[in-house]
Amino acid sequence: MFSYRHAFHAGNHADVLKHLTLIATLKHLMHKDPGIQFVDTHAGAGLYRLDGDYAEKSGEAADGILKLLATKDLAKIPALQDYLDMVAGFNSGGSTRIYPGSPFIMHRLLRYEARDRLKLFEMHPTDHKSLTGNIEQLNAGRTVSVTRADGFESLKALLPPPVSTSGSRRTCVLIDPSYEIKNDYYRVIDCIQDSLKRFATGTYIVWYPIIPRPEAHDLPRKLKTMCTQLKKPWLHATLAIGRATGGDDTGLSASGMFLINPPYTLKPLLNEALPIVAKALARGPGQSWAVESGG
Ligand code: SAM
């Protein structure tokens, strides 16, 4: 079950889509004063070396963040710039050796004065150990917690979120499984359904791979149907980098993000950023991007 290690994939095109969307969403949520609870149900190790064994073996960042950074005359548009600034903030001396995973991206955006909280869950023993060690360096105290537990199950106890000092309840949840087992697709649907019952106004962010598998194809369709029935706003963004002509091309080439209760600012930001990202990361035929919304 536990063969997936995010270190092989850190900074790839799927991380670019996921983290660009995550940052744009969080930045909007931070505009409001009350404190917010962030949850990362599948956190990974938190920080990744792009010059380490795992990343060098897979070379996936070369088709993702490193390719984006190497693109000449990249248009300076807000969501893209925020993402690139975030990655640059973990590196110095002009080279990109460290890639921040979602826990560190979320932590960077936390407001200690607003008493934002970050709850991280990771099941893999090695990644949990790395994550714990990485988070300890932050001396974040009670602001950040790391638990070795099932993220889907653990989320239940966190919803509804606690009342903030200003009397409101707010949460934003990233659900980013590895989909190693096909049950993950069903668990995502159940998790969203249950979470909306517990806390209907939370912002829920789901990443999923676009692969030729019925469960992957059905996931956004089922989420859309659920949102329509529950009258919940949703946003669906996809990025495909196309197939390389020649060479080994068996890896993931497309992925999607599905958000429930997304910020209203997200659609225009992604509509501006994704065509530039898709063009910069294009490998060959099949390159595309799309943003749709409803509710
Ligand atoms: N969210 C991370 C990021 O963006 O940097 C990447 C996470 S990676 C795609 C998925 C992680 O979920 C893996 O590290 C895997 O070990 C972990 N995992 C798998 N099943 C889990 C579960 N039921 N609960 C918590 N973590 C799980």
Image (cartoon, rainbow, N blue to C red):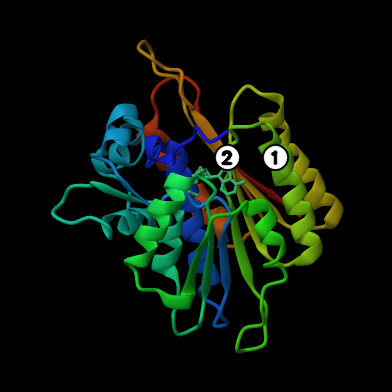
User: Which residue position holds label 2?
Assistant: 256
Q: Amino acid at mark 2?
A: Gly
Q: Is residue 153 above or below residue 250?
A: below
User: Which structural element holds mark 2?
Assistant: strand
Would you identify the image quadrant in which residue 88 lies? bottom left
In the foreground, 206 or 81:
206
Horizontal side, residue 24 vs residue 49: left or right: right
Q: Is residue 94 above or below residue 2?
A: below
Of all residues, the one furthest to the right in this rendering is 229
* Residue occupying the point 45% across, 19% down: 243
Q: Going from the N terminus, do you reach mark 2 or mark 1 first?
A: 1
* Disc 1 residue lies near ligand 1 with CB under 8 A: no
Where in the figure is residue 190, as x and y percent of width and height?
A: 77, 47
In the foreground, 41 or 3:
3
**Image quarter (top left, top right, bottom left or bottom right) of the C terminus:** bottom right
Classed neighbour count for the residue bearing mark 2: other residues with Cα under 10 Å, few (<14), some (14–19), many (≥20) = many
The reply to whether residue 183 is visible in this rendering is: yes
Q: Which mark is residue 31?
A: none
* Residue occupying the point 56% across, 79% down: 35
Where in the figure is residue 96, as x and y percent of width and height?
A: 23, 47
Q: Is residue 236 above or below residue 90?
A: above
User: Which residue position holds label 1?
Assistant: 220
Q: How far is mark 2 from mark 1, CA to CA?
A: 8 Å
The reply to whether residue 290 is visible in this rendering is: no
User: Which structural element holds mark 1?
Assistant: helix
Q: Amino acid at mark 1?
A: Pro
Circle 2/circle 1 CB separation < 8 Å: yes
